[in-house]
Image (cartoon, helix red, strand yellow):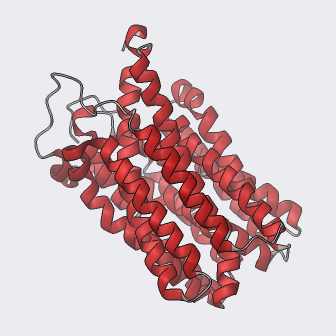
């Protein structure tokens, strides 16, 4: 793509709007995740029950993801993000208010949050591939860095709310309102998902399920999504219960994980352009394994915090690299991204109950070793994310 196209005001506006969508999604999710220990204590949940409650988010996402490809293809990424931002705000508010009463409204709210987040995720990634194409350079991981930046902001705000003893309900309700207003304003600036005269790949949203390369990328993303999702859901709990730090310091461990992911995603494009997708993600998978070993077996909280940073860095590029690989052919991006995200989000379905079940038997801290195993799987299948020429099917 030429620099002239990259300089068009509508493309620059769409790039800013895409960053806003990623940041808003991350901010909302991390705001919820930062209050998980307080919700657990308020509802008196053991690790197994907490895992089942968190499962509601993944269940909602997995219901939305297979539908999101055809939906985005039909109504576009802009309208999809607009509607899902409103639904996410409703779900977060219901979960926040339910945390003061009983488990049922929390589960309902988290299901709505997960459904909205799943469709929103596919739509903003599709818009990210469109912006990449117009700019003529790889910036997908920086959009995901925007997501991570939002998660860092949400986690730090959450830590402050915990330290200041602000209740869960007003904190998360205010976050919901802020995210809905900000994202719906920005998403109107998205550019069309297809350029004028560009032919749509007929049936791509469904036929992508038959493409071996697409399915293998889905497995790759699943492994990295498990590493990311477990870090989001369980870092603070594992630090508090396993390393016996205070709730505020446990939330800061979560913030350290998210900060490392943000750094990796922001500086990732240079590494990917210089060394290629496969070598970079293989090295990062190894870094993640080392970090998990430090976090689990470290003799003091200092080692645990160092491990958290390496874990977050190692998990940073897997998901965005998988999304970029799915969008190599822009005509088939919606279908392929939907399939890859659907498979990847199985990690968010299986992650909470897996860690919760193992946590009941071996402690949450030891249960995190499953993440290291899956990062090894990701390294083995990482050749699937090598660039694909437009129109090529494998």
2 or 386, which lies in front? 2
99 or 56, which lies in front? 99
221 or 178, which lies in front? 178
Relative to 40, say whether 287 is above or below: above
Who's the residue at 41% across and 40% down the image?
187
- Splitting the image into 4 quarters, where does residue 263 fall? top right
- Splitting the image into 4 quarters, where does residue 327 fall? top left
Q: Is residue 212 left or right of residue 309?
A: left
| Furthest-left residue in this view | 202
Which quarter of the image is occupied by the C terminus? Answer: top left
Q: Is residue 315 left or right of residue 389?
A: right
Relative to 257, say whether 300 is above or below: below
Who's the residue at 71% across and 48% down the image?
259
Q: Is residue 256 left or right of residue 169?
A: right
Who's the residue at 77% across and 80% down the image?
241
The percent position of residue 286, horizontal first and vertical second, equals: 63, 51
Which quarter of the image is occupied by the N terminus? Answer: top left
Q: Is residue 109 visible?
A: yes
The percent position of residue 281, horizontal first and vertical second, equals: 54, 43
394 or 209, which lies in front? 209
Q: Is residue 344 visible?
A: no
The percent position of residue 76, horizontal first and vertical second, equals: 26, 42
The percent position of residue 270, horizontal first and vertical second, equals: 58, 26
Number of numbered labels in the structure image: 0
């Amino acid at each position: 793509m030429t620099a002239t196209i990259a300089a068009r005001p509508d493309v620059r506006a769409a790039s800013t709007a895409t960053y806003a969508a990623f940041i808003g999604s991350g901010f909302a999710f991390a705001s919820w995740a930062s209050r998980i220990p307080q919700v657990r204590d308020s509802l008196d949940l053991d690790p197994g029950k907490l895992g089942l409650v968190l499962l509601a988010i993944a269940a909602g996402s997995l219901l939305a993801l297979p539908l999101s490809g055809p939906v985005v293809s039909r109504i576009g990424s802009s309208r999809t993000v607009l509607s899902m931002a409103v639904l996410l705000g409703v779900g977060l508010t219901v979960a926040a208010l339910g945390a003061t009463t009983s488990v049922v409204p929390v589960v309902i709210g988290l299901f709505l949050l997960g459904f909205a987040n799943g469709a929103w995720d596919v739509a903003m990634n599709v818009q990210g591939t469109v912006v990449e194409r117009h700019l003529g350079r790889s910036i997908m991981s920086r959009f995901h860095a925007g997501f991570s930046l939002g998660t860092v902001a949400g986690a730090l705000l959450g830590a402050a709310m915990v330290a200041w003893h602000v209740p869960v309900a007003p904190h998360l309700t205010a976050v919901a309102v802020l995210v809905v207003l900000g994202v719906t304003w920005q998403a109107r600036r998205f550019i069309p998902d297809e350029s004028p005269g560009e032919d749509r790949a007929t049936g791509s949203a469904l036929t992508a399920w038959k493409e071996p390369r697409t399915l293998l990328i889905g497995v790759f993303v699943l492994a990295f999504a498990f590493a990311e999702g477990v870090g989001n859901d369980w870092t603070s709990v594992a630090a508090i219960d396993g390393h016996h730090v205070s709730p505020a310091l446990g939330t800061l461990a979560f913030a350290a994980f998210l900060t490392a992911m943000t750094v990796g995603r922001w500086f990732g494009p240079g590494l990917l352009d210089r060394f290629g997708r496969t070598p970079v993600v293989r090295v990062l998978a190894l870094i993640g394994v080392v970090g998990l070993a430090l976090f689990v077996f470290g003799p003091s909280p200092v080692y645990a915090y160092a491990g958290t940073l390496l874990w977050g860095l190692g998990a940073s590029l897997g998901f965005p690299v998988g999304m970029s690989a799915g969008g190599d052919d822009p005509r088939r991006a919606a279908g392929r991204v939907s399939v890859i995200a659907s498979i990847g989000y199985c990690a968010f379905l299986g992650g909470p109950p897996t860690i919760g079940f193992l946590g009941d038997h071996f402690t949450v801290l030891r249960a995190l070793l499953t993440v290291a195993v899956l990062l090894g799987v990701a390294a083995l299948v990482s050749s699937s994310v090598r660039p694909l020429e437009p129109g090529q099917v494998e």
